[in-house]
Amino acid sequence: MADIMVRKRKRMREKEIKALKEHLFEIFGVETFGDKDAVDMAESSEYNLIFVNNDILGLVYEGKPFLTVRGLLKYKPEARAVTVDMGAVPYVTNGADIMGPGIVDADPNIKEGDLVWIRDIKNRVPLAVGMALRSGNSLKSKEKGKAIKAIHNVGDKLWKTGE
């Protein structure tokens, strides 16, 4: 395991799991974990983690639940996606914030402060999770400056914990 500290892990109640599942469905429009899955919530150094059958498939950042990159790979949603050009990929996978000029497409339903996921234009696979600093239409406008604050990406501590 990598150097992410996980503490206070406990099994969630059915009622809590149902509420979380419904919230994630509202965000992504895809079914996530099922009723038979074991879902745990745990604290870590940066955010709370959601374990589904011992895999970290979700996180809670500033009170907002969202899927991790592994969760995005498993459930394959389309909503809340931001697509970047191939030139931005090395920076995104190294944990850099996403700049406006590198964005080629974004979900128009994104609001400022929403958690979003970043994918590349060629393979369309999840690379990172971040917080939008602009709305979806503003993200598409390629304005200069920081557009998305990076929270979690392929290759970071959280990704390595799941290997």
Image: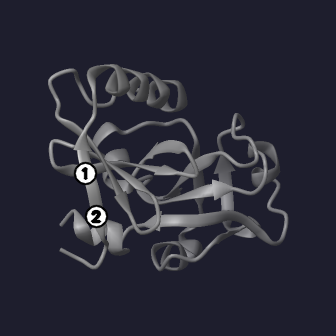
Q: Is residue 14 visible?
A: yes
Which x, y percent locates residue 148?
Answer: 67, 62
User: Residue at 84% across / 70% down in the picture?
Assistant: 144
Tell me if mark 1 has few (under 14), some (14-19) or many (20+) residues whose alpha carbon lies within 10 angstroms of its own: some
Image side of residue 102 versus residue 42, left or right: right
Spatial CA span between label 2 and label 1: 7 Å
Q: Which of the two residues, 20 or 97, is positioned nearer the viewer here?
A: 20
Image side of residue 62 versus residue 141, left or right: left
* Amino acid marked by disc 2: Val
Q: Is residue 31 visible?
A: no
* Amino acid marked by disc 1: Arg
Tell me if mark 2 has few (under 14), some (14-19) or many (20+) residues whose alpha carbon lies within 10 angstroms of its own: some
Are the residues flagged by discs 2 and 1 in contact, CB closer than 8 Å?
A: yes
Q: Secondary structure at mark 2?
A: strand
Q: Quadrant of the N terminus?
A: bottom left
Residue holding disc 2: 6
Residue holding disc 1: 9
Which x, y percent locates residue 2?
Answer: 24, 77
Residue 43, quarter of the rendered image: bottom left
User: Residue at 58% across / 76% down in the picture?
Assistant: 87
Q: Which of the two residues, 75 or 38, is positioned nearer the viewer here?
A: 38
Q: Is residue 41 above or below residue 149?
A: above
Q: Which of the two residues, 163 or 41, is positioned nearer the viewer here?
A: 41
User: Residue at 41% across / 29% down in the picture?
Assistant: 20
